[in-house]
Image (cartoon, grey):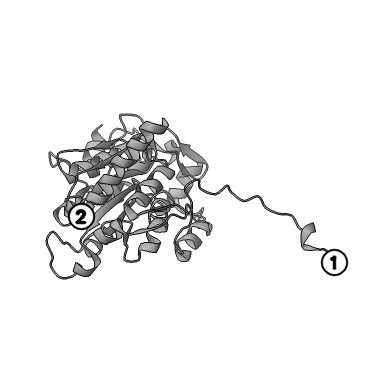
Amino acid sequence: MSGSSLSDLPVEPRAPAHPLAGTRMSGARMIMQVLADEGVSAIFGYSGGAILPTYDAVFLYNEECVRTGAPQIPLIVPANEQGAGFMAAGYARASGRVGVCLVTSGPGATNTVTPVRDCMADSVPIVVICGQVSRAAIGTDAFQEAPVPTMMGAVAKHIFLVTEPLRLESTIRTAFEIARTGRPGPVVVDIPKDVQTWEGVFQGEGLLGIAGYRRRMREPKPTPDPGLPYTQACHTSAASHAPVQPRTGRPRLPIICLSGRSRRSVSCGKTAMTRPPSPRLPTTTPARPAAAPVRTVTGLPMQAWAASA
């Protein structure tokens, strides 16, 4: 076997360094810069004491954009934090990007529980950045303190509590990665106020080492058993599997479970649905299987309405 020197080995081109890499800035400015690097074009939020450093960074960033001619990132202020969460979800549904919600600690964070749960149910990618009391005051029942990791852990796809300032930059990037990959969903980042005011060197790159999550993303999806009836229905004509009503003899309309992901192409075997179904086809929410009775506002079971449609 002939030997070869290191100079003969192929060299993979490296991505150019971030133009701000090595710059010393506050944690709040790092948050804002990572949001810009992730392609965020709008922020929805409501201010409060624990998140004010990041709000100042938003305004400073937009002032710099005015001087340089770069596109600004508007800050859209709703009536309350719940509205900010739903606006970020609507932005994500309409644009296909990750929505961003910026709220304060305590009641500001608790007001976002409903939109976070809604995004988890409908697979909508958003990142909720919550202010938090300083690290020394966490767990002391301080003013406007709430246990965000405990509260959001039950309704969000993932939750981060930033206790090490050196990992702030990589945590925000990882939050976007988790929100948009796999099954999209909401990711909550709880950032203490002293982490936002901390000053350090901006790296311009780096992610957290979530090896287990990335390994699951690389694993091939299991292939369904072709002998199951629902799989056969995907590969053959739907009419041949439609149940027939004894009295009328006409096929009963199928019930399709749709969620927020129905705007994207949903594949099933060799059949792909790239546009909404016929208006005459009833749909259910993904929370219950189609075989279970699903009550509507009027109390009429969904199956009875489908049979009479």
Q: Is residue 276 left or right of residue 220?
A: left
Label 1 sits on a secondary structure element that is loop
Cα separation, mark 2 vs mark 1, equals 61 Å
Amino acid type at circle 2 is: Ala
Asked if one can make out residue 5 in the rendered structure from this viewpoint, the answer is yes
Is residue 197 shown above or below 163?
above
Residue depicted at 20% across the width and 61% down the height: 133
Residue depicted at 45% across the width and 44% down the height: 233
Residue depicted at 40% across the width and 42% down the height: 36
**N-term-proximal mark, 2 vs 1:** 1
At which x and y percent is residue 264?
Answer: 42, 38
How many marks can you see?
2
Which residue, as the protein is rendered here, is positioned at the far right?
Answer: 2
Residue beneath label 1, please?
Answer: 3
Q: Residues within 10 Å of mark 2 (few under 14, many from 20)?
A: many
Q: Is residue 75 left or right of residue 296?
A: right
Query: Can you say which quadrant of the picture contains the C terminus?
Result: top left
Query: Can you say which quadrant of the picture contains the N terminus?
Result: bottom right
Residue beneath label 2, please?
Answer: 50
At which x and y percent is residue 246?
Answer: 30, 39
- Please state which of residues 289 and 227 is positioned toward the viewer in this rendering: 289
Is residue 100 shown above or below 144?
above
Amino acid type at circle 1 is: Gly
At which x and y percent is residue 160?
Answer: 32, 61
Label 2 sits on a secondary structure element that is helix
At which x and y percent is residue 209?
Answer: 46, 64
